[in-house]
């Protein structure tokens, strides 16, 4: 049975998709069979892993509307132990359809439950909004990983997401846990970054990952080449940080089993 982690923050530009791609890659590098579900209509996790979206016949759109099982959408990547269930912008239209559908909140969970045994980890890249798709991700997941950018307005709006998590936990997914808060785009040379990091730790006591993700130009460049940072520049600061994050995630979810 796979450990399902939703990478979620309703704020855009916080390194959410970068985190989903690179966490999935380094979990796969650690020998874990990993599926990355691209559940963001922008489809950046798909293109960030080199998927040519114009060639796709089955995507997460078909999975969510129930016309295809998850296994039909899954495609292998160029990286051992790593698969992706891609998406295209059509998924945004599906959300309107879903709003009228039966069991609209648990479509993703139903799809994952059938395929779960084939993987050790399933990572969901959620949209940057508190939408029906995001709620589907929260209901399907065991854990939420929350990337938070080390900037002045970092904690603004997070209350709403945490409230949504609380409602989901109460109504539909009692086992949902916050796996950890991940400070991203940290520039240790600036006082602001350091202050925000301290504020995040105060706000989420005991829940902030030990690793932080630095502001790193190589991380920003990697998606345009369709590869994770571990392939684009494995010696970069960003690569080392995401490798450390994968180790910490394994420790937090498996009690240290590697």
Image: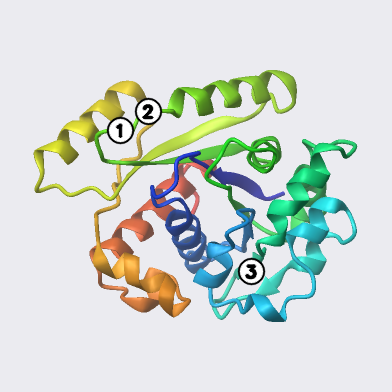
Above or below residue 26? Residue 8 is above
Mark in the foreground, 3 or 1:
1
**Foreground residue among 113 and 146:** 146
Q: Determine whether the residue tagged by mark 1 lies in a helix, strand or loop.
A: loop
- Tell me the SS state at disc 3: strand
Q: How many marks?
A: 3
Q: How far apart are labels 1 and 2 at the CA level?
A: 5 Å
Left or right for 111, reference 206: right
Q: Are marks 2 and 3 in contact (CB under 8 Å)?
A: no
- Could you tell me residue 128's position as x and y percent? 52, 45
What x and y, as percent, mark residue 30? 48, 64
Which quadrant would residue 201 be assigned to in this image? top left
x, y percent for residue 131? 64, 38
Residue to which mark 3 is pinned: 83
Q: Are marks 3 and 1 in contact (CB under 8 Å)?
A: no
Q: Are marks 1 and 2 in contact (CB under 8 Å)?
A: yes
Q: Residue at x 49, y 65 (%)?
A: 25
For disc 1, the neighbor class at 10 Å (few under 14, some 14 to 19, many from 20) is: few
Which residue occupies 25% across, 54% down? 214
| Label 2 Cα neighbours within 10 Å, binned few <14 / some 14-19 / many ≥20 | few
Tag 2 secondary structure: loop
First in sequence, mark 3 or 1: give its number. Answer: 3
User: Which quadrant of the figure has residue 194?
Assistant: top left
**Mark on residue 130?**
none
Label 2 sits on residue: 156
Estimate the x, y position of residue 127 in percent, counting from the top left: 57, 47
Name the residue at 68% across, 18% down. Answer: 170
Using the image, determine if residue 167 lies above or below residue 10. above
- Which residue is tagged 1? 153
Is residue 114 or residue 157 the one in the foreground? Answer: 157
In this rendering, would 97 be left or right of 159?
right
């Amino acid at each position: 049975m796979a450990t399902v982690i939703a990478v979620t923050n309703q704020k855009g530009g916080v390194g959410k998709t970068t985190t989903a791609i690179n966490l999935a890659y380094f979990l796969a590098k650690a020998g874990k069979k990993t599926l990355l579900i691209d559940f963001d209509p922008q489809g950046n996790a798909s293109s960030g892993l080199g998927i040519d979206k114009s060639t796709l016949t089955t995507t997460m759109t078909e999975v969510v509307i129930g016309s295809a099982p998850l296994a039909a959408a899954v495609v292998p990547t160029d990286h051992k132990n790593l698969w992706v269930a891609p998406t295209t912008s059509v998924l945004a239209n599906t959300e309107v359809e879903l709003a009228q559908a039966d069991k609209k909140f648990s479509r993703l969970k139903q799809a994952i439950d059938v395929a779960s045994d084939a993987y050790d980890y399933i990572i969901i890249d959620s949209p940057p909004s508190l939408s029906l798709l995001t709620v589907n991700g929260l209901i399907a997941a065991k854990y939420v990983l929350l990337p938070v950018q080390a900037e002045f307005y970092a904690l603004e709006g997070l209350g709403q997401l945490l409230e949504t998590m609380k409602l989901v936990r109460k109504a539909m997914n009692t086992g949902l846990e916050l796996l950890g808060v991940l400070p991203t785009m940290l520039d240790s040379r600036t006082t602001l970054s350091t202050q925000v990091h301290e504020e995040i730790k105060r706000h989420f006591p005991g829940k902030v990952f030990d690793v932080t993700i630095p502001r790193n130009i190589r991380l920003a460049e990697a998606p345009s080449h369709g590869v994770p940072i571990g392939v684009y520049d494995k010696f970069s600061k960003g690569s080392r940080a995401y490798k450390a994050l994968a180790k910490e995630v394994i420790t937090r979810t498996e009690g240290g089993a590697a």
